[in-house]
Amino acid sequence: MQQASLKPAMRRGLWVFVILVVLAVLEYLLALVMKSGNLPWMIIMNIVDAALILYFFMHMAQLWRKEE
């Protein structure tokens, strides 16, 4: 792969990583602030975390693409 074609993918991976870090900090702060009733919010954030990891880092979308 050429360096020019790698840059957008690396930038996208960095942004996904930053989003995952922000979500982890929000989960931690939510757990500290809300003493009860935070389970639905935690579930939503964890589903978003899992979806980002599956799609961007585990390349789940490639499983359903036709082989070239």
Image (tube, grey):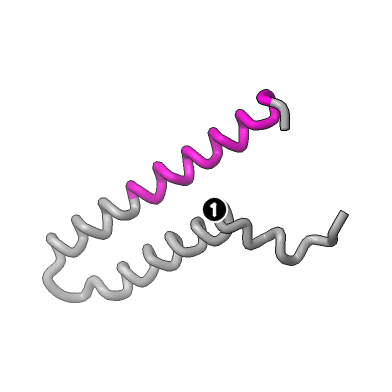
In this picture, residue 4 sits left or right of residue 29: right
Disc 1 target residue: 57
Element type at mark 1: helix
Q: Splitting the image into 4 quarters, where does residue 42 fall?
A: bottom left
Say above or below: 1 vs 16: above
Residue drawn where x is 47% and y is 39% of the image: 15
Q: Splitting the image into 4 quarters, where does residue 1 fall?
A: top right
Q: What is the chief secondary structure element of the magenta stretch?
A: helix
In this picture, residue 36 sits left or right of residue 16: left
In this picture, residue 26 sits left or right of residue 48: left
Looking at the picture, how far across and down is residue 50, in whole percent?
46, 64
Looking at the picture, how far across and down is residue 66, in whole percent?
84, 61
In this picture, residue 6 sits left or right of residue 28: right
**Range of residues picked out in magenta:** 3-22
- Choose between 27 and 6: the one closer to the eye: 6
Going by the numbered disc 1, the residue's amino acid type is Phe
Task: Name the residue at the top extreme.
Answer: 4
* Crowd band around label 1 with a 10 angstrom C-alpha radius: few (<14), some (14–19), many (20+): few
- Choose between 41 and 24: the one closer to the eye: 24
